[in-house]
Amino acid sequence: MSMINVHNLHKKFKDNVVLDGIDFTVDEGEVVAIIGPSGSGKSTLLRCLNLLEQPDQGEIKIGEASLGAEHYGKKEVVALRQQTAMVFQHYNLFRNKTALQNVTAALILAKNMKKSEAERLGLEFLKQVNLEDQRDQYPVTLSGGQQQRVSIARALAVNPKAILLDEPTSALDPELVDSVLRVLRNLAEKKMTMIVVTHEIEFAREVADKVVFMADGKIIEQGAPNDVLRYSKNERTRRFLQQLDKHKEVPV
Amino acid sequence: MNFDFGYMLRVFPLIFNYIPITLLLAVISMIFACLLGLVIALARQSNLPGVKQLAIVYISLFRAMPTLVLLFIIYYGLPQLFPSLSGLNAMVAAIIGLSLKEASFLAEIFRAGLDSVDEGQLEAGLAVGISRFKIFTHIVLPQAALNALPGTGNTFVSLIKQTSLAFTLGVTELFAEGKMIASASLKFFETYLAIGLTYWMLVIIYSWLQSYLEKWLGKPLRRA
């Protein structure tokens, strides 16, 4: 059953076309990796799904909520946002709140849950990302990997139909990437629907059910990880992947 | 040297009686200035047509006008246009003038404080379904307050001192009382020095309070 349905999505920043007619679907429990060169519109696509960017044209349907880009009201925005949660490249934790408070903030402020109940639940989610011992620490005292795991717990806490992850490991030191990928693998095994914009090709190959390659605001090709990442017949895709490979061989 | 130390010590208790008036002027003006300053800071960032321009003009005008001139306009000038204002209490006029003046400084300080909180936290809040208003009050404002505190503190210190201008409207506060004592005893140096030291003491006490406040608000942002 399709959980996310995007039809003919367009987005311009002034005269710059960023999304040029995007169509794609994500099934329940599916992990979709979006790859592509920078400026290809990957992040914008993700941010349109929860209206952090306003699309100009097209339809979005997630879970029970749907809207047309041409005209929608506040209620529809809220309804659409309630379907998903987002994990950001730079974590974007609330800096004045502890790890646990970051997780419980939405429960208390948006879902009007009692504090004790929210904390009980929040602790469960911190356990899922192996950070229950850091519950009372503020973001500034956490490593990048820990901060990103808190942000994943924060996303899980709102019980989303799908999680949108915008380059979740790009800002991390290499040795911290694994701790985050481990958590994501875990979620994939539990059949959490996820869309991940990523440069971690290995991760995409291993965890994703579907890989989408984007360039110039269009989906160039999509399919099973191996079909796109290993045996692609598309010239653009192959060139992009070759460049990534070359980049890897550069000694650090 | 013609300096009566004992006299100066005797002046302190006399002028201390007027500290409450000075503090009342300062604190009440500060509260109004903070509220107005926050509104102007937000208006300064507004997209509504004209609102931003209005805020810019306000800041420019009130920042430029000397406090003394502003107080005279309000207390001596306005009743000429609006006779109903001729009964305006001098204390109230002083509070209005000081609030309007300080709000223009605070608006800029608050704007910088608000700008210092990265947009990403707002987005993160929206993405998990928290309303803009609650994100503002629970997440943005506490952090902005910390960043704005040193500048706000400076403004308050300057406000404490500017309350002495209220004497020109006939408000008997710290300075006005000292002036009367000095004219009676003709011991100008002792009296005015005592007044100056009293302001110093007030500012020192306030600075302690501010550093406690800074520690408390800054707790989340320290690594230790």
Image: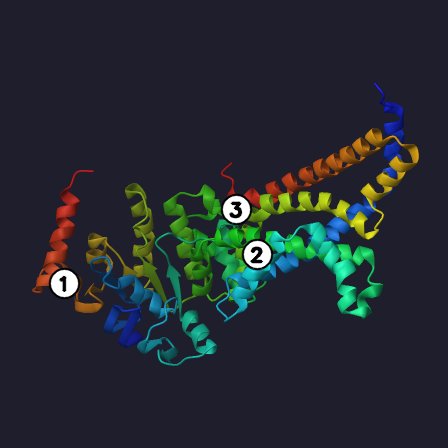
Residue picked out by circle 3: A136
Q: Which mark is residue B60?
A: 2
Q: Amino acid at mark 2?
A: Ser
Q: Give residue B37's position: percent from left, percent from top.
A: 61, 57
Tag 1 subunit: A
Q: Which mark is residue B165?
A: none
Q: Give residue B207's position: percent from left, percent from top.
A: 67, 38
Dots 1, 2 in contact, CB < 8 A: no
Q: Amino acid at mark 1?
A: Val
Query: Of helix, strand and loop, which one carries label 1?
Result: helix
Q: How much space separates mark 1 and mark 3, taking CA atoms?
A: 43 Å
Q: Nearer the viewer, residue A224 or B19?
A: B19
Task: Give the class, few, some or many, for how many residues have Cα within 10 Å of label 3's Cα (few <14, many ≥20).
Answer: few
Q: Quadrant of residue A174?
A: top left
Q: Residue at x 52, y 46 (%)?
A: A136
Query: Of helix, strand and loop, which one carries label 3?
Result: loop
Q: Residue at x 17, y 38 (%)?
A: A251
